Image (cartoon, grey):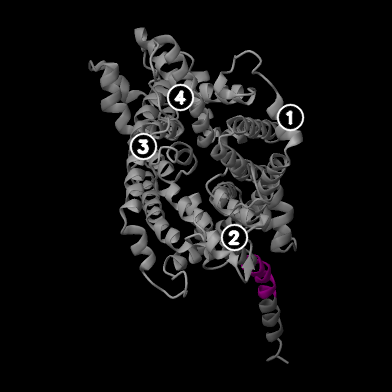
Amino acid sequence: MAVGAPAAPGRTALNLTRFRLEPALILGVLCLAALSFLVVVPIGWLVLTSFQDSDTQALTLRNYFEAFSHRIYLEPIANSLRLAISVAAIATIVGTALAWLVSRTDLPGRSILRPLILAAFVTPSFLGAEGWIFLAAPNSGWINKIWVALFHSEHGPLNVFSMQGAIFVIALYSIPYTFSFVSATLDMMPSELEDAATTLGSGIFRTMWSVTLPLALPAILSGFLLSFLEALELFGPPAFLLIPARQQVMTTQLYLFFSDYPPRVEVAAAYAMPLLLVTASLLLVQRRIIGRRRFTTVGGKGGVRRRMQLRTWRWPFFGLAFILPLLSVILPYTAMLLVSLSKNWSAGPFAPGNLTLYWYDWALNVNGTTREAIVHSLSYGAVAATLAVVVATAVAYMAVRKLFPGVQTFAFLAVAPFVLPGIVLAIGFFAAYTHPPLLLYGTAGILVAAYATRFLPIAFSNSSSILQGLTTDLENAARTLGAGPLRSLWTITVPLLRRGVLTSWLLVFIPALKELSASVFLYTSHTQVITTVIYDFSDAGNFEAVSTMGVLMMVITFVIVIVAYRLIGREVIRSAA
């Protein structure tokens, strides 16, 4: 009896341990299955397909030889690099200058200028490209028509269908990256060193160049890298502006591989590999810059942040600073709105009898494709956001709470899609799910899964940051009172995460609503969304329909943001932005 007595408590303790581990293991298995479906399988098939022979399925390097041994395929790579470097340089210079003016000087109208600059974040760059087609197309653009009428010349000075036009348009919507990074850094920077330089006789511009900007260098470099990557992986603006000019970049060349019948998936997968590697490498460089190159200033909560006096330069600089929102938001939005209200946009917005609401009635009541596309965009985006948030929150909870060994692998998989350009991710989904055992192509499921994967890192990062700020005391108290891990999670943690989960949902839903690069590869005639309808109408030259759908998409986006503002509150919306 004495020998057997201790054994019972031991077995009870062992059973209790197994009972407590079981929910975490079940959650881990479910998350692993979801991450495998969303991340591992598409990336694995992307790499495997790049080495497969299209006929025999045998492993080969022929796809790489085909992709990188012909001049017609090498020119798009050179064009992509030229485009990305030019865009990043312009965006960094302009964004840094604007951030300095708004954050460190007494520039008038700062409170209006900042949201107008950041409004370019909300505008999809492909809609900006469409707006500039109406303004600067060589023969029909309104600016060129006004120029011809005023100066009686044969042609206008602008041609948006060119490499220079594409650089200009993409740079407009990349400037907010550098602006947001640098302005956030400058807003937190005390003024002691700048005051010391001024006291020693340094002028305002010399102080900016020798003191302020070196302190913000990590943010400036981060803005450069993100602008470079954004330009490198964009599909919409190059497709709208460069394909008519018969110039290709890597993303449009990838689309052309899919335009053949049958699609040259294997060559496309091989051609996408450098894009994937460059993106991953530069994001790693950016992380190292942010993580290791930290500049500190002597100061703290009591540090004084005085604004430099521009004096006679205040209003001239305000005029220069206002050019960006004028070019990126006001002119394109106005052009799209006027075109959507025109019977024939090339006649001009104020031609007699040209204004009409026909296209809105046509899109909302007459044309079944456009109505279905709106419904599909809202439903696919909602389901994708829900899927991404559920998976991201579960993985973040396991990773932050360290429920079992190896859980950081799950976190790595959740952020891995961040290095995948949308167009590369779409090729991976196409390669993985266009054949048994899981045939998803032609269904809504492949678009939902692609959207959820594309923006999974955003939801994971947001959920992780919120969970790290939540203490485990309440969960531990619930377990002490007999609640299991899942019950304490559901009754204690989930209610505390409610606002954060809704914010994550919106951070996935809104960009999913505007996603083009993945959609254009994966949609069919039965799964059209707003962005693919816009692309098809643009390809067909129906620009009135393009503008109407673009305006409707932006109205839907703004309504969602306003509703979210009401439900969540100003402070959460600011953190999300």
Within-10-Å neighbours for mark 3: few <14, some 14–19, many 20+:
many
Q: Which mark is residue 162?
A: none
- Mark 2 and mark 3 lie on one chain; the one further toward the N terminus is 3
110 in relation to 235, above or below? above
> Which mark lies nearer to you, 2 or 3?
3
Residue assigned mark 2: 398
480 in relation to 498, above or below? below
Residue assigned mark 1: 361
Q: Is residue 18 magenta?
A: yes
Q: Which quarter of the picture shows residue 20?
A: bottom right
> Which mark lies nearer to you, 2 or 4?
4
Q: Amino acid at mark 3?
A: Ala
Residue at the left extreme of this rendering: 201
Q: Secondary structure at mark 2?
A: helix
Viewer-proximal residue among 430 and 96: 430
Q: Secondary structure at mark 3?
A: helix
Q: Over which residues does the magenta segment extend?
A: 16-29
User: Where residue 301 appears, x then y in whole percent?
Assistant: 45, 30
Viewer-proximal residue among 567 and 352: 352
User: Where residue 378 appears, x then y in whole percent?
Assistant: 69, 43
As measured in the structure, the alpha-carbon distance from the residue carrying label 1 to the one carrying label 2 is 49 Å
- Mark 3 and mark 1 lie on one chain; the one further toward the N terminus is 3
- Mark 4 and mark 1 lie on one chain; the one further toward the N terminus is 4
Residue assigned mark 4: 139
Q: Residue at x 66, y 15 (%)?
A: 353
Q: Residue at x 67, y 71 (%)?
A: 22
Q: Residue at x 54, y 65 (%)?
A: 41
Left or right of 369 on screen, residue 89: left
User: Where residue 464 appears, x then y in whole percent?
Assistant: 56, 50
